[in-house]
Image (cartoon, helix red, strand yellow):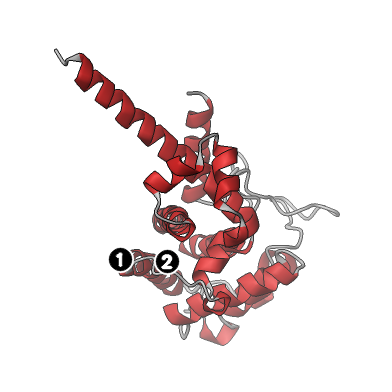
Amino acid sequence: MPGDAERAAGERRADARRNRARVLSVAEEVFAADGLAVPLSEIARRAGVGPGTVYRHFASKEALFEAVVIDRIARLVDDTCALASDDDPGAAFFAAFAMVVRQVAVNKALCDALTAESGRAMAVGPELGERFRAALAVLLERAQRTGAVRADVTVDDVQRLVHGCVRMEQAGPTGRPTAIVCDGLRPMASERPAGLPDVTELPAAARNETRPKAPAGGARPGATAPRCAECGGPIAAARTGRPPRFCGAACRQKAHRRRAREHQ
């Protein structure tokens, strides 16, 4: 059996892990709202620890900021990858596009980290950046094969459009710039593969995700587009059965994880 010294050392390590997790959690909330401007002492105060505890885990505020951003981007990459298994490639691509724009636009830490003009562009690691690019490429290729996205769009185009939408979303109104860009990513009638429906002939509500969508069985005046229960983004109405609650697999998994945490 372990001696008193070993037990004490184990408890100290467990306390250190809990303190580190607490600091990261609080720092994520603070950086998301205020970016790198927030003092380290304020993060320590909100986390319920002393500044020395923070410095034992992170050499500087910049190191803490980078750890928070890398963790957040990794989760965003995981959510994007999860959408690649969605049964509707077109819906999955546009859901991922809107999800990335929405999360980056409202999170000042991600904006500071991912926007070169801020002067704080971070080296989040080539592996993480390549994973994100690869996830977008898979989603784009699947959507293009079904005719949901223009064939001449590249993954570089998508990344540049994401950055542009983030800037426009911050200026407002929220949702409209992304919806317009998504409409532009859809192919014209002459570009669609034979046998697929022509999106230009669909009702306006079906082409613009921010406008009301007609329910199955006929249009209903004043109806609003269904929204994801987790992220609030637009979701496609189900043709049959129960209405969907989430825009895709990533939000379903996120909601499941959140409910599991709440019941712990």
Count of numbered tags: 2
The front one of 245 and 25 is 25
Expressed as whole percent of the image width and height from the top left, the position of residue 113 reads 50, 67
N-terminal of the pair, mark 1 or mark 2, is 1
Relative placement, left or right, of 156 versus 118 is: left
Instruction: Indicate the quadrant containing the N terminus: top left, top right, bottom left or bottom right.
Output: top left
Comparing 41 with 1, the one in front is 41
On the image, the x and y values in percent for residue 42 come to 60, 46
- Residue kind at label 2, given as amino acid type: Leu
Q: Which residue is mark 2?
A: 139
User: Residue lying farthest top?
Assistant: 1
Q: Residues within 10 Å of mark 1 (few under 14, many from 20)?
A: few
In the figure, 57 relative to 10: above or below?
Answer: below
Describe residue 70's horizontal placement relative to residue 183 as left or right.
left
Residue at x 51%, y 24% (from the top left corner): 263
Residue at (47%, 49%) from the top-left corner?
A: 249
Residue under label 1: 127
Q: Nearer the viewer, residue 7 or 184?
A: 7
Callout 2: SS: helix
Q: Is residue 165 above or below residue 248?
A: below
193 up-or-down from 3: above or below: below
Q: Amino acid at mark 1?
A: Glu
